Amino acid sequence: MNRPYNFSAGPAAIPEEVLQRAATEMLDWHGSGMGVMEMSHRGKEFIAIYEQAESDLRELLAVPEHFKILFMQGGGLAENAIVPLNLSRAATVDFVVTGAWSQKSRKEALKYAAEVHTAASSEDSSFTTLPDPASWQLSRGASYVHICSNETIHGIEYHELPDLKALGSDAPLVIDFSSHVASRPVDWSRVGLAFGGAQKNLGPAGLTLVIVREDLLGHALPACPSAFDYQLVADNRSMYNTPPTWGIYIAGLTFQWLRRQREGNASGVAAMELRNQAKAQRLYDYIDGSQLYLNKVAANARSRMNIPFFLRDESRNDAFLTGARERGLLQLKGHKSVGGMRASLYNAMPMAGVEALIAYMQEFERLHA
């Protein structure tokens, strides 16, 4: 089947192999007589799916044993409340604001933390840069420091996670890695908690991944709903309430797909990192050499996953998008708060899709430059 290339920022493209496998198992999973959506989450069939998914993810991301993997619901937006409900201890929390998602996270934390402190912000650059960690004004005794390690809307990514200890802080680092989880390895020695919605790189909307260091469990505020208390969720192996079973199943198939990926001697997430670096560099190089297109993000802060770009003559935006759709290049319109275009190059996007986009951009430039 010759499918279009889907550049959506999320919900986003899922590997075709995963979709085909799910289709063949839709009515009957492994001879059980049931589809996954019909199974009891406590039955042996789904427990097998869950255990395999958890094991594969721990291996793929090299998650240490002293971290718990939680499969939750509510997406990244809900975690903006659930994190401070669990970790703030009604004290001060620090935020580094680098785009729309860290802005939302900070605003939500104001409801639960005693004080929310902005340690650094790149708003003065219209979120086209990352503030140097050496300039961060971190609070003494903060409960945690929150960053969005990849800003989907503004196309900003930390290429290296900050080392808070080197900056003089003992606070755990919380990262929202929704839009680049599994696109590159994670340095868990620098992370206390990572969360992300699955709908960009791992599977369908409805599943939220939380990976949390064990010593951070057990500190939920009294007002925290039981279903969102990380300690309760961990103690019940993500089944304190009915989990998003279909989302876990599709994510599990995606983890298996990721394990099969190879680039030279690299495999799994390491292979995806090489592939994602190559895809992003190819598109950035074309944009930078173009007379018609523009990316405004500083080179050392550019996202590999989400590449916003603009036509220098924005009156041609609609014509560009119409032509893209006609060529099977879908969902390239930029976020409404930013405008322009955005190409999301998640794991499921092959290099062939990037090349098809560039070929169209070249054609459009020849006609309209």
Image (cartoon, helix red, strand yellow):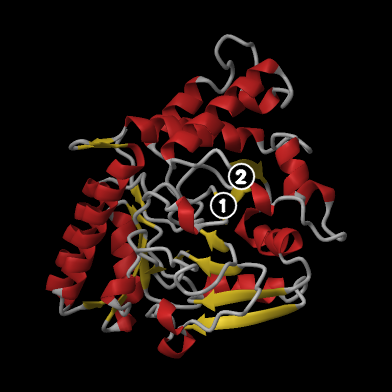
Q: Return the residue nearer the eye: 135 or 25.
A: 135
Say whether residue 183 is visible: yes
Numbered mark located on residue 314 in the image: none
> Where's the C terminus, which quadrant?
bottom left
Tell me residue 296's x, y (percent): 31, 80
Kindly tell me whether residue 131 is visible in this rendering.
Answer: no
160 w.r.t. 202: above or below: below
**Residue visible at 47% across and 54% down in the picture:** 189
Find residue 18 and report its horizontal and vertical position in percent: 43, 31
Secondary element at tag 2:
loop
In the displayed image of the protein, which residue is found farthest to the bottom? Answer: 124
Secondary structure of the residue carrying tag 1 is: strand
Amino acid marked by disc 2: Leu
For mark 2, does the 10 Å Cα neighbourhood hold few (<14), some (14 to 19), or many (20 or more) residues? Answer: many
Question: Where is residue 187 shown, x and y percent of the image?
Answer: 42, 53
The amino acid marked with disc number 1 is Gly
Q: Going 49% across and 67% down the picture, which residue do you hit?
A: 165
- Label 1 belongs to which residue? 197
Label annotation for residue 207:
2
Name the quadrant containing residue 103. bottom right
Left or right relative to 33: residue 289: left
Residue count near mark 1 (Cα–Cα under 10 Å), binned few <14, some 14–19, many ≥20: many
